Image (spheres, helix red, strand yellow):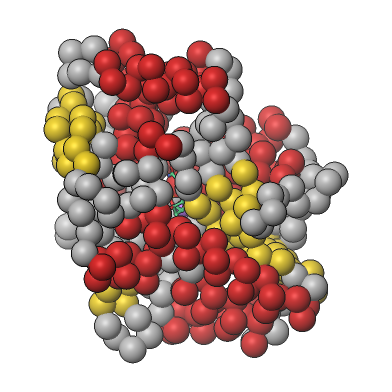
Amino acid sequence: MIIHPQIQGCVARNCHPLGCRAAVQQQIASVRAAGPFNGPKRVLVLGASSGFGLASRIALTFGAGADTLGVSFERGPSDKGLGSAGWYNNIWFRQAAEQAGRIAINLIGDAFSDTLRQQAIETIRQQLGQVDLVIYSLASGIRVLPDGTQVRSVLKTTGQPFSGWGLDLERDTLVQQSLATATPEEIRDTVTVMGGEDWQLWLQALQQADCLATGAQTVAYSYIGPESTYPLYRDGTIGYAKEHLHATAETINLQLAHIGGHAWVSVCKALVTKASAYIPVLPVYLGLLMGVMKERGVHEGCIEQMQRLFAAKMYGPQGVVADGNRLIRMDDHELDPAVQAAVSALWPKVTPDNFHVLGDFAGLRRDFMQLNGFELPGVDYGAPVDVSSLTELVP
Ligand code: NAI
Ligand code: NA
């Protein structure tokens, strides 16, 4: 079977499993090239199969020799298709980690459920003993609460409705997009799905089960962004959820004091992932930002960002480098006033005719394709993929 990309709007409908392997290998090579650092040895990664979670796992295993348990929600092969990119990322990551002599366990299921929490606790007890670090990197549009209630998050703004050019990855063009004003219920529901409640439930359960080592830390990922994106993000429903996440770090931090542990939030830079491509209008900012940051030599992809987080800002010589609000600022280069001035000068000029000239939308598009295993160097996309051998692989 020859696999061609199927992109619908800003969502990939399929993946190239062998391309996913090349993408995982590329990230491993990047971490190896950056050199080793002294990091945590046993790590639980919630949301381990793509984006920041996968990059974190790769940075810690191949940079610091960590054994990991990764939790994710992914589809394997079925009559509906070959399965999701994250499914294969889990497989290729585990294979590479085991080749390097590391433990890598994948749990596939709903991280919001008590059942999966118990499964993770059992697995930690049996295979890792305890963990030194818990990474919270879930991005989801839906959460089923422990009592069975389904809650959905929305991507809306909270002030005036906001509209502007958005990116249509399928047609490689710009289209008008708008964010409606959220109702109070929609804000509350988005906080329930993407805020800190579930993070706290995880840390509580792990601590009660004695799965956290003395001095264990936890970090969750957040975004703030520049003022020009506030209507899209910080003042949007997702921004309220992140505010809640930040407040939860304080609560968890207090709880971890008993074992000498700490909770942090890492405020990251905007990057192309499955989750961010889905936010209206934001990818146009992202394409302009990528152009400006590359021009100035300060661009980072997911893997560079996560390698720097652990090697320099959490486990470097100075320990954790955070501001007064327990926030680790990985968005320092993005928020550099000179970078923002350059982006702000370009943004009002963007049209469907000139966006490729004004920003690095080719780079953004390639990053997006690569998340799904397409457009990676060294992969023969004209060659048929042996589907039966892929269906035998397990995460
Ligand atoms: P992603 O979509 O690449 O990764 C999400 C992960 O969560 C995947 O591993 C997926 O399998 C897992 N997941 C989703 N629902 C699940 C469930 N019910 N049970 C188990 N696993 C589940 O997204 P990305 O961008 O890596 O997002 C991770 C975090 O980073 C999010 O909190 C996001 O807000 C944050 N962040 C993202 C930025 C960006 O520009 N992409 C910037 C700053 C923060
Ligand atoms: Na992730």
Residue 299 appears in the rendering: yes
Q: Where does the image place residue 197, in percent across and percent down from the top left?
A: 47, 74
Image side of residue 183 versus residue 144, left or right: left
Q: Is residue 378 left or right of residue 96?
A: left
Q: Position of residue 380 (x, y in %)?
A: 35, 26
Locate the N terminus by quadrant. Answer: top left
The residue depicted at 35 percent of the width and 30 percent of the height is 285
Q: How many marks?
A: 0
| Residue 316, percent from left and from top | 79, 45
Q: Quadrant of residue 164?
A: top left
| Quarter holding residue 345 | top left
At which x and y percent is residue 270? 45, 38
- When asked about the image quadrant of residue 305, the answer is top right
Which sits in the foreground, 30 or 278? 278
* In the displayed structure image, the side of residue 123 where residue 258 appears, left or right: right
Residue 108 visible in the picture: no
> Residue pushed farthest front?
160
Query: Is residue 356 shown left or right of residue 320?
Result: left
Kindly identify the residue that appears in the image at 61 percent across and 74 percent down: 251
Q: Nearer the viewer, residue 389 or 213?
A: 213
Residue drawn at x 33%, y 13% as measured from the top left:
358
Residue situated furthest right in the rendering: 317
Quadrant where the C terminus is found in the figure? bottom left
Q: Nearer the viewer, residue 392 or 189?
A: 189
